[in-house]
Image (spheres, rainbow, N blue to C red):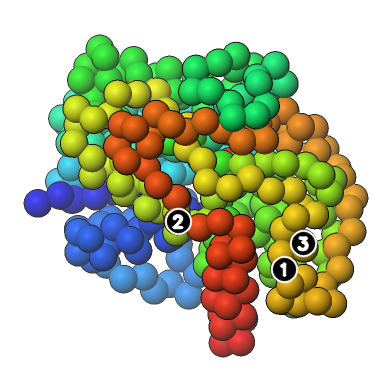
Amino acid sequence: MEKILVIGALGQLGSELSSALKNIYGIQNVIVTDIREPEGGNIDGPFEVLNAMDRSRLFEIAEKYQITQVYHLAAILSAKGESDPKFAWQLNMESLIHVLDLAKEKKLNKVYWPSSIAVFGPSTPRENTPQNTVMDPNTVYGISKLAGERWCEYYHKKYGVDVRSLRYPGLIGYKAKPGGGTTDYAVDIFYQALESGKYECFLDKDTYLPMMYMDDAVKATIDLMQSDKNKIKIRSSYNIGAISFTPEQIAQEIQKALPSFKISYHPDFRQEIANSWPDSVDDSEARKDWGWQHQYDLTKMTSSILKGLSELLDN
Ligand code: SER
């Protein structure tokens, strides 16, 4: 019987991944934690407040619930990290090391930790970015993800920790809002389109970035974690791709359903971050090793979000 600990479970990815894990493993077997209490105070199943940097509390919760797997999702993202780089480094790194130590010392079955396209930088080839290539991240978030990847591989090789990871592109979901990322425009745009009919984008209209619908991200994560151990050849982090588009292209897609929707562009400091990331990634290793396949293209994603978010806002 698996007992799963999710760290950062109230975040954009955490909330949707936790629901999917509860459906698979049972509500009582997924222990969700976050640095804050859930809004409204109610959540199905066990919940604990956990600051991911608090090592002894992490070990205490793991002991209390006899945890066998950890999904460590807490992080400070690319744009927010730039306002306090040392704190972002401290949180992103210390929390990972605590989780890897927990896995090593308590012999956990598996650990999941997300990396990101932010591990790439201005000298990285931009199109169809290979798994192994130049990596010169220039955000503290990207630096911490690249260092984290090295730590994951190190703990796997040295101590046999079964840690698995994906380099997510920008994740687009509407059920919980992201915070502090460079790709967040692609979530905000849907809220603004439905609420005010217009959106001022903080990236330029032709900024290509790799993106993925949340349903695909949850599926990728669970597929990876449920794969046979010996299929996982990469223990740093897998490139994983789905779709790439620009702000102009997603706006045009939204206009098919909402013809009066207007977009304007006012690039800020996040433009430089976006410019340092790939347009698209080569995820053939993930497709080959454990059968990754995405299901949502831009059109299918846009209609799914517009439908789901309209219902959410109506309630
Ligand atoms: N979505 C993240 C960000 O924009 C990238 O991993 O920071």
Q: Gap between marks 2 and 1, in whole Å?
A: 19 Å
Give, as a three-letter code, the residue at label 2. Gln
Q: In this view, does 121 lie to the left or right of 94?
A: right
Q: Gap between marks 3 and 1, in whole Å?
A: 5 Å
Q: Which of marks 2 and 3 is nearer the N terminus?
A: 3
Q: In this view, does 48 lie to the left or right of 310?
A: left
Give, as a three-letter code, the residue at label 3. Ala
Q: Is residue 100 visible?
A: yes
Q: Is residue 85 visible?
A: no
Residue at the extreme bottom of the image, as rendered: 315
Residue at the extreme left of the image, as rendered: 1
Quadrant for residue 204, please give it: top right
How far from the left and from the top, in percent, is residue 40?
48, 75
Q: Do the residues labelled 3 and 1 touch (CB within 8 Å)?
A: yes
Element marked by disc 3: helix
Q: Gap between marks 2 and 3, in whole Å?
A: 21 Å
Toward the viewer: 107 or 222? 222
Res. 251 mark:
3
What residue sits 72% from the left and 41% below the top? 208
- Callout 1 environment at 10 Å: few (<14), some (14 to 19), or many (20+)? many
Mark nearer the viewer, 2 or 3: 2
How far from the left and from the top, in percent, is residue 186?
68, 55
Q: Name the residue under label 2.
A: 295
How far from the left and from the top, in percent, is residue 182?
69, 43
Give, as a three-letter code, the residue at label 1. Ile
Toward the viewer: 219 or 1? 219
Which quarter of the image is occupied by the C terminus? bottom right
Q: Name the residue under label 1.
A: 254
Quadrant for residue 25, please give it: bottom left
What residue sits 76% from the left and 32% below the top? 275
